[in-house]
Amino acid sequence: MINYFKNYINEKSLSQKFFDLGIFLLPSAVPISIFLLIISSINSYLKSGRDFLRDKWNIPFLIAAFLIILGAVVNTFYHNSQAIIENHIFWLGIANWIPLFLIFWGIQPYLKSKSQRKNCSIILISGSLPVILTGIGQYFFNWTGPFSTLNGLIVWYQRPIQFPGGLTALFNHANYAGSWLNIIWPFILASFLSNQKNLLRK
C-alpha cells in the first residue's frame, strides 16, 4: 500500500491529483470537489485545446449547449409574456447545465485508459465511505446533525429519520442519499466481480 502511494505521488501529474481528489471529495465536500475539478478541467483545456471536437460523442452536448443558450435568448428578448421578471430563470438554467458540459469535456483526458477509469471508480467508492458510515450511524445510533466545518463551507446534514422520509446519511434529503448509492452501486458490483479468484480482495 505504501509503495502504491509512493508510485502515485511520483507518477501522477498535479492536475491528475486534483482530479482524483475532486472525485474523492465529491460526496462529502462538494464545494472543494467542484473547485478541484474545475482546476483540472481548465488545465486539460489548456493542454488539449480543441481536441474534444474530434470525439463525435461530444457533438450532441455542444448542440444541446447551443440550444439552451438560444432558448434563453429567445425567451428573454422575444417572449410575449408580461412576467419579465421570470426571465432570469432561463439564465439560471444555463448556469446549471453549461458548467456540467464543460467539466464533462474537461475531465475526459483523465479517463482515457482502462486503468484510469478503474482507478476513478475505486476513488469514487473510497470517497463514498463517509456516506455509508454516516448512514449506518444515523440508522443504528441515531446520529443527527447538522455538522459543519470551514465556517459553513462543508455541511453534513444528518437529519433525523422520520416518516415520510428515510435515511439521508450526510445529505440533505433521503432522495440524494438514494441517488448517490445508486450511482456507486454499479462500480461496487464491478469491483466485486473483478476479484472472483481472490476471496480476501473480494
Image (spheres, rainbow, N blue to C red):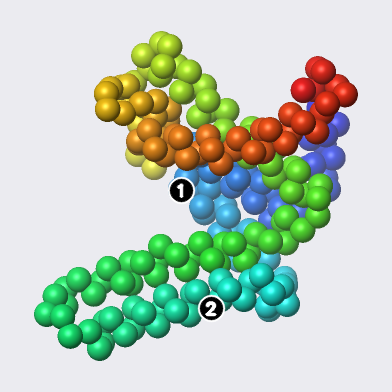
Assign the N terminus to one quadrant of the image: top right
Residue at image point 68% right, 61% down = 108
Residue at image point 42% right, 39% down = 176
Name the image quarter holding residue 38.
bottom right
The amino acid sitting under disc 2 is Ile
**Residue tagged 2:** 63
Q: Is residue 164 left or right of residue 183?
A: left
Can residue 175 be seen from the camera position used here?
yes
Q: Position of residue 138 (x, y in %)?
A: 40, 19
For mark 2, give the secondary structure: helix
Up/down of 51 relative to 95, above or below: below
What count of labels does the image hold?
2
Q: Position of residue 172 (x, y in %)?
A: 35, 36
Name the image quarter holding residue 80.
bottom left
Residue at image point 39% right, 38% down = 175
Can residue 155 be seen from the camera position used here?
no
Up/down of 26 relative to 126, above or below: below
Q: Is residue 200 left or right of residue 96?
A: right
Report the disc number at residue 31: 1
Residue at image point 33% right, 83% down = 73
Q: Position of residue 171 (x, y in %)?
A: 40, 35
Q: Residue furthest bottom?
A: 78
Up/down of 34 relative to 74, above or below: above
Report the disc number at residue 120: none
Q: Position of residue 29 (x, y in %)?
A: 48, 40
For mark 1, give the secondary structure: helix
Name the image quarter holding residue 83.
bottom left
